[in-house]
Image (cartoon, grey):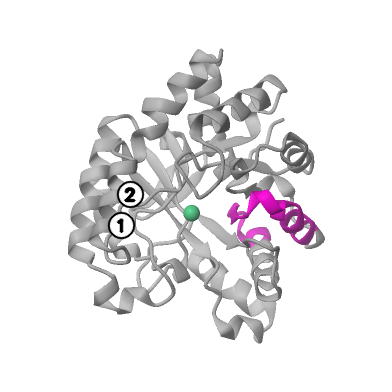
């Protein structure tokens, strides 16, 4: 029994149930919550509740919403949509790719203090506490300010036991760099999930990450640029299960239904591309995984047991 933080307060980890480990109820960029032109909160609220309620009816109990301050996180919105839909939402601290200029210059420990405050006290004047830390690196590798964020996240995690979820660019093997930096901070690697790993089909890369002790975020199953289609991604998951890594994989869509940042045409296209929203995995990926030979027990491990163990910090290989 472990208490975990959600937008509506603490819950017992045994109540997490079926969990998507990398989603965003709404998404934006640093400060975009301050620009109504880019952030139609009412319309976003209505859409998020509609799709989250559908997800709840379809069996989704919990999502890890890994949008920190610079991805337009709005904890009051997260609390409201959780209340209205019945889906638990774990809120994120940390920093995504829109790293504040300030973070280049302040001591890393001061950034860590900010994260620790969001985890132990509350966010944006509320008592809503983060349950997870996000950090991000992208194409071309880890930049100097992104390295500072990774180190700050490691230090905040070691002080609070909050797990870390990264954003990476797997085709450039950026996860290897993140692992090296986080390892240098002395953190228990089982507190870390290297996200977006299934943008790569390179099993050497994926198993190398697993051997370092981290979780693998197989958390994109929709179209992302030139990366593999969902069937290939699912086949890789099955191969990793067959090789004994099924208890170290976290699944998600990396999806959001926000409006404001997108033109109406772009939003309509995204909706048309994924009419299943947060049920794509349940309706397509898991049935295909079973077709490939995965058992109900394998799926329970992926969707229920793994997210719980990741959040709890109870790592049993
Ligand atoms: Zn994401």
Q: Which mark is residue 270?
A: 2
Magenta span: chief secondary structure: helix
* In the image, residue 11 above or below residue 141: above
Identity of the residue drawn at 48% across and 59% down: 92
Q: Quadrant of the C terminus?
A: top right
Identity of the residue drawn at 36% across and 74% down: 32
Note whether residue 79 is visible.
Answer: no
Identity of the residue drawn at 59% across and 44% down: 199
Q: Position of residue 265 (x, y in %)?
A: 25, 57
User: Foreground: 93 or 12?
Assistant: 93
Q: Is residue 265 left or right of residue 200?
A: left
For residue 39, what is the image quadrant? Answer: bottom left
User: Foreground: 195 or 153?
Assistant: 195
* Residues at circles 2 and 1 in contact by the CB criterion of under 8 Å: yes
Q: Which mark is residue 266?
A: 1
* In the image, residue 41 above or below residue 274: below
């Amino acid at each position: 029994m472990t208490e975990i933080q959600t937008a509506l307060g603490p819950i017992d980890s045994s109540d997490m149930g079926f969990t998507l480990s990398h989603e965003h109820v709404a998404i934006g960029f640093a400060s975009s919550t301050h620009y109504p032109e880019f952030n139609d909160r009412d319309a976003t609220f209505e859409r998020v509740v509609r799709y989250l309620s559908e997800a709840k009816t379809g069996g989704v109990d919990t999502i890890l919403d890994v949008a920190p301050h610079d991805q337009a996180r709005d904890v009051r919105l997260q609390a409201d949509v959780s209340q209205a839909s019945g889906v638990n939402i774990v809120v994120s601290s940390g920093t995504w790719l829109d790293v504040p200029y300030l973070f280049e210059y302040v001591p890393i420990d001061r950034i860590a203090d900010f994260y620790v405050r969001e985890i132990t006290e509350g966010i944006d004047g509320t008592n809503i506490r983060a349950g997870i830390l996000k950090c991000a690196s992208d194409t071309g590798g880890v930049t100097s300010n992104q390295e500072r964020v990774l180190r700050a996240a490691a230090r905040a995690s070691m002080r609070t036991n909050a797990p870390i979820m990264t954003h990476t660019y797997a085709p450039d093997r950026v996860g290897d760099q993140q692992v090296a930096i986080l390892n240098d901070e002395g953190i228990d690697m089982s507190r870390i999930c290297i996200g977006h790993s299934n943008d790569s089909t390179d099993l050497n890369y994926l198993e190398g990450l697993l051997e370092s002790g981290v979780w693998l975020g197989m958390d994109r199953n929709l179209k992302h640029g030139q990366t593999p289609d969902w069937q290939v991604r699912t086949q890789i998951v099955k191969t990793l299960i067959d090789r004994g890594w099924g208890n170290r994989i976290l699944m998600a869509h990396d999806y959001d239904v926000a409006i404001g940042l997108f033109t109406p045409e772009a939003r309509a296209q995204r909706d048309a591309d994924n009419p299943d929203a947060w049920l794509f995995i349940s309706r397509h990926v898991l049935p295909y995984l079973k077709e490939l030979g995965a058992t109900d027990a394998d799926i329970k491990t992926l969707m229920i047991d793994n997210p719980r163990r990741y959040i709890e910090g109870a790592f049993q290989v």
